[in-house]
Amino acid sequence: MTALAPEHVTMPVFHRLPHVHRDEQIAYIAEAARQIRIQDLKLVHYAGAGHIGGDLSAIDILATLYGAVLNVSPETVDDPERDRFILSKGHIAGGLYTTLAAFGFLPVDELATFLKPLSRLNGHPNRNYVRGIEANTGPLGHGLPIAVGHALSAKLDVSRRRTYVLVGDGELQEGSNWEAMMAASHYELDRLTVIADRNRLQQGATVRETNDLEPLDQKATAFGFAAVEVNGHDHGELLDVLSSVPFRPGKPTFVIAHTHKGHPISFMSNNAAWHHKVPSAEQLELALDELTAVDRSGGAA
Amino acid sequence: MTDTDVEQGGTIPLEPPAASRERAPQQSISERPRFDCRNAYVETLAELAHENHRIVGVVNDSVGSSKLDAFKRAFPDRLINVGIAEQDMVGVAAGLANGGRIAFVSAASCFLTARALEQIKADVAYSNRNVKLCGMSPGMAYGELGPTHHSIEDIAWLRAIDNITIVVPADPIETAAAMRWAAEIEGPVFIRVSRMSVPEVYPADYTFVPGKAVTLRDGDDVTLISNGTVLWRALVAAEQLEDEGISARVISMPTVKPLDSEAVLQAAQETRGIVTAEEATAAGALGGAVAETVVQNHPVKIKILGVPEFAPTGSAGFLLDRYGMSPSGIAEAARALIR
């Protein structure tokens, strides 16, 4: 197999859109997500490692956040008043790096170093190496407490900056999340949004078979959150919900984003085998064909 | 006076630290008043919080055990109590640091370092966040409560983590000085805050220098290296040895990591052996750090005094004596080493 090389990096750079019509914004996010998926599939194939299933599950959420929701750009990445995005499911670093590169936080060319010896682009994100990364995550159940801490700092500062944290659904089996959720509602952190990537699969099986989370919305509500459910692959729904927090004054928001691991590749979607399986050359070609066939104006259907 | 009498100090009044208080220069350390370092901790934290609005406290319900009631009254918004949830506590501290705050996490060292070890590793040390972890009542301070509440392992397991400075102050003056330093620098620090009362071993104008040993007593026969609650015992041991004509150097090693290897190697070269003594595991703590340095650079005989097991029931003082860290126990270890 050919090793990851500069010629495998083909993604265009996107920029945050100025305020435009919602439809235009959604089309723009959809195209960014499509390009991020194409690039990320190439990275994982040529690097020979990665967590492609979880990447593809979350890329629509990442593209929506960076494309149109988060008040952060490559120019304001050190601004204390920037919005924070914390990726708790750090194993989808490939998806995060590709998204950061797509929006100009990281040189696109550097994606060619993904997982290579001494690369800044480790298998889990490192904030000391890559600007735009807020926490060194990887062990699960860490991001939500960190997000609560940041949201507390914003509250102490009487700041309007927001905190978003993306957790995997399997990850919610870690007790530290629930410790943090109790604190978030106790401190009335209504500018904190937890997004659960609800793809219903964990490493080797469904979440339900492993240690079921349901009823997740009721659990989040019982822990003092305003719970909202969205289609995690619908950029319009994501944009509307993530831009509208808080839904209830005084309450943090818990967004259950219904997703499919491996979305939208037909042979990967909703298939636990693709947690960290690497696509073969043939599978890569099939996947890229599917993504190229997607109508660019219609979103990643 | 037996060593146990010395330790328990039942008739010796506990006083709040007073920098201006007179101290008879010739007074033996064992006869000096004793102090609970938590008092210096809370006073210094309050001073720091007055000076710098970025400073916040983070606790796991440990307001009372950390003596933070007055701090809470003075800064009600700046004492974050996450409840009995240590993993959340350390993650929250890292998040507060992300937002520009300087978080002083204050919790019983056993729960802070054991329950939240992965958060200390990933969220604080590896993420290089400006968090100060203050391990309260460390070592065997909760003596009779048993090994679940002892924090003898904290030094060893934090030593294995990159990018975190480990400080074990020996008295209230050093506790306050280490906190002031920690508040000024950017980055992860772990400070042990003793509950078992100790006499002052430093002058009031002592300046803590991270990574630097302090030679409290010079000597050329044998070296005693210690820190924390055991340091004054090593000083008394040196007094006892002097009476027998044995010249013992006493090195205070408040910073376990990074270790002042220069001071250690100088002792290895200039004296006949090194005894380390600390209220921590005999494996992997200060003794381990000294041994690693000595054996790789200038091997000499070393005796590591520490806690080798889950301790039986007893007060911290009783247990230190039991594990050879009474003043006479330390003196005997030194004698045996150079015999």
Image (spheres, rainbow, N blue to C red):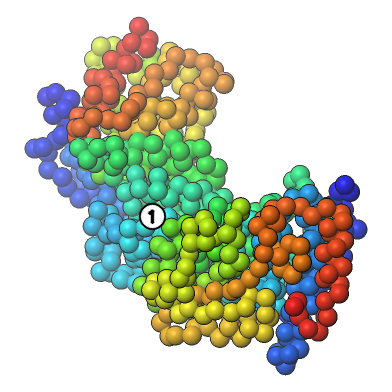
Query: Residue at the location (52% across, 71% down)?
Result: A194
- What residue occupies the far top of the structure in this picture? B339
The crowd level at tag 1 (other Cα within 10 Å; few <14, some 14-19, many 20+) is many
Visible residue check, residue B7? yes
- Provide residue A265's location: percent of width, then percent of height: 77, 66
- Provide residue A165's location: percent of width, then percent of height: 55, 68
Query: Residue at the location (40% across, 58% down)?
Result: B89
Query: Residue at the location (83% across, 80% down)?
Result: A295
From this view, report whether residue A134 is shown above or below residue B312.
below
From this view, report whether residue B231 is shown above or below residue B297.
below
- Provide residue A260's location: percent of width, then percent of height: 66, 68
Looking at the figure, which quarter contains the N terminus of chain B? Answer: top left
* Between A204 and A132, the one nearer to me in the picture: A204
- What residue occupies the far front of the structure in this picture? A209
* Between B75 and B141, the one nearer to me in the picture: B141
* Between B154 and A262, the one nearer to me in the picture: A262
Tell me: B81 left or right of A15.
left
| Figure quadrant of residue B64 | bottom left
Tell me: B208 left or right of B317.
right
Which amino acid type is marked by label 1? Glu
Q: Mark 1 lies on which chain?
A: B
- What residue occupies the far right of the structure in this picture? A7
* Between B24 and A43, the one nearer to me in the picture: A43
Q: Is mark 1 on a helix, strand or loop?
A: helix
From this view, report whether residue B221 is shown above or below residue A112.
above
The residue under label 1 is B86
| Figure quadrant of residue B194 | top left
- What residue occupies the far bottom of the structure in this picture? A21
Query: Residue at the location (52% across, 80% down)?
Result: A228
- Provide residue A215's location: percent of width, then percent of height: 45, 71
Looking at the figure, which quarter contains the C terminus of chain B? Answer: top left
Visible residue check, residue A189? no
